[in-house]
Amino acid sequence: MEYHVDGQLVPAEEASVNVRDRGFMYGDAAFETLRAYGGEVFAWDAHADRLERTCETLGFARAIPPREDLRERIAETLAANDLDDAYVKLSITRGVQAGKLTPDRAVDPTIVVMVDSLPRGGVDGDPVWDGPASVRTVETRKIPDAALPADVKTHNYLNGILARLDLQRGASGDPADEALLFDTDDYLAEGATSNVFFVADGVLYTPTTDQSLLPGVTRSIVLDLARAEGLPVETGRFEREELLAAEEAFLTNSTWELRPIEAVDGESIGAGPVTRLLSRLYDRRVERSCYE
């Protein structure tokens, strides 16, 4: 494999960053996880918008290259590895600076693209997951937006890591695939690396972005597809019992796309007609955007 590091393709085993890079020292960096289908990056503009918003929040948006340049780096990395269907991670750090907490005004960002092979997606594709997800609620709470902006995607992923560690600490039976976090008011927020949806009485529900959660790109696409199909959609604040009473539920992120939830805290939920419909519509969107 070859990765793209600061404008150069290098063998994966030689790809590295400086130990004084602020992304390494402090998590002072932005990233996006994307999928390429048929050699095309899916939903690129939405990902680029969020990446730029994260860099703006971190205060170094003016130092990053134009999105066309970043997309070309991804294309070069895919081509170098002869990949059409792939996982893509694009990271931009504030770069190498002196070892002090206060950032320097001058920024020379470090830019890294990593890729890995995935199955074909779209109408004739295969999911990357082996089966529906088993999820568990955890004690770790989502960090409030007032403490750490929830709508940005930075290298500081400690909140999600602690949630996944909760799964390991509480493992008494079958292992879970995802941790579900609640906010400090005990309302359902999101998974450690996913957004969550559930269906009750034919209505599609998902936590509101007024809460402290990351508005996922796949989440937004699913909401657009549901509304275009005429499905009733409600965003709001939901308690654990409402999720457990659902007729069907699923998780979303760019890699999983839509992954049905088999059980929450050992209580069965499963897929259903709304989940299957939205999965088909998502596959068709991918097919039209990337394979036709």
Image (cartoon, helix red, strand yellow):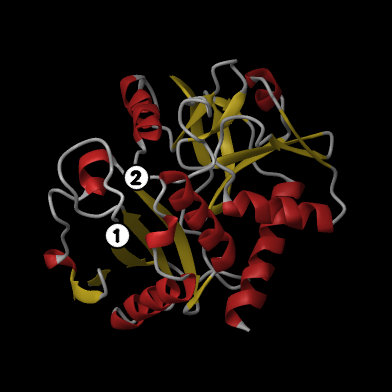
Secondary structure found at label 2: loop
Viewer-proximal residue among 104 and 222: 104
> Residue at horizontal 32%, vertical 66%?
113
Residues marked 2 and 1 touching at CB (< 8 Å): no
Cα distance, mark 2 to mark 1? 14 Å
**Number of residues whose C-alpha sits closer than 10 Å to that of mark 1, classed few (under 14), some (14–19) or many (20 or more):** many
x%, y% of residue 168?
32, 26
**Is 291 placed above or below 249 here?**
below
> Residue at horizontal 75%, vertical 57%?
225
**Is 17 placed above or below 196 here?**
below
> Residue at horizontal 30%, vertical 63%?
111
Query: Which numbered disc flags the more N-terminal residue, 2 or 1?
Result: 1
Q: Amino acid at mark 2?
A: His
x%, y% of residue 292?
63, 84
Viewer-proximal residue among 141 and 19: 19
What residue sits right under mark 1 in the picture?
109
What residue sits right under mark 2 in the picture?
155
Q: Amino acid at mark 1?
A: Pro
Which residue in the rendered view is the most extreme toward the front?
105
User: 4 left or right of 50?
Assistant: left
Identify the image quadrant of residue 173. top left
Identify the image quadrant of residue 26. top left
Give the position of the N terminus as an image quadrant. bottom left
> Residue at horizontal 27%, vertical 37%?
102
Secondary structure found at label 1: loop
